[in-house]
Image (cartoon, rainbow, N blue to C red):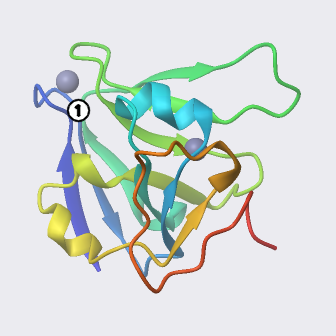
Amino acid sequence: MHVEGGCYCGAVRYRADGEPIMKAQCHCRECQYITGGSPNVFMIMPAAGFAITQGETKPFRRRDLANPVTREFCPNCGTHLLTRSPNLPDAVILKVGTMDDPSQFGGPQMAIFCIDKQSFHRIPEGIPAFERFPG
Ligand SMILES: [Zn+2]
Ligand SMILES: [Zn+2]
């Protein structure tokens, strides 16, 4: 799969080549801040095929957590483009809404961190839902 995308203002652009490692929606409380309240829909792609092709992201990492993820934002418009996790060093977690063609995503394979799910969150029928990260 070849994916291109970028932020809301167009300053940051990326490409991602390779097979998706995981497609999911995350209901965790942290993602709710970033999405506006809904689950965070993401696609994990191999880091080897990923590159920022224009501009630069601004990374943010929480200092109060032992093993925090790094969330990368456009410094100009604030769009959250991707996350890097210390548990997935060879991958990038792309936010589907930043893809030029979000329909490439197809749909989530699972719902994760449903322990934080709100009553107004919807999980598509027929996919597994996990309390936390599976495995
Ligand atoms: Zn931007
Ligand atoms: Zn989350």
Q: Position of residue 46 (x, y in %)?
A: 52, 68
Q: Is residue 41 left or right of residue 29?
A: left
Taking depth in this image into account, of 120 and 129 the one nearest to the observer is 120
Please give the residue where the numbered disc 1 appears in the rendered image.
12
Ligand 2's quadrant = top right
Which residue, as the protein is rendered here, is positioned at the far bottom?
126
Would you call the spot at circle 1 few (<14 residues within 10 Å), some (14-19), or many (20 or more)? Answer: many
For numbered disc 1, what is the local secondary structure? loop
In the image, residue 25 sits, relative to residue 124, either above or below, namely above
Q: Position of residue 64 (x, y in %)?
A: 81, 14
Which residue, as the protein is rendered here, is positioned at the far front?
119
Total labels drawn: 1
Which residue, as the protein is rendered here, is positioned at the far right?
66
Q: Quadrant of the N terminus?
A: bottom left
The structure residue drawn at horizontal position 82% and vertical position 73%, both measured from the top left corner, is 135
In the image, residue 112 sits, relative to residue 63, either above or below, namely below
The structure residue drawn at horizontal position 60% and vertical position 33%, both measured from the top left corner, is 29
- Please tell me in which quadrant of the rendered image residue 8 appears: top left
Is residue 113 visible to us here?
no
- What amino acid is at disc 1? Val
Is residue 46 visible to us here?
yes
In the image, residue 117 sits, relative to residue 16, either above or below, namely above
- Please tell me in which quadrant of the rendered image residue 79 appears: top left
In the image, residue 19 sits, relative to residue 15, either above or below, namely below
The structure residue drawn at horizontal position 52% and vertical position 42%, both measured from the top left corner, is 118
Q: Position of residue 70 (x, y in %)?
A: 61, 32
Q: Is residue 34 left or right of residue 128?
A: left
Q: Is mark 1 within 8 Å of ligand 1?
A: yes
Q: Position of residue 75 (x, y in %)?
A: 32, 14
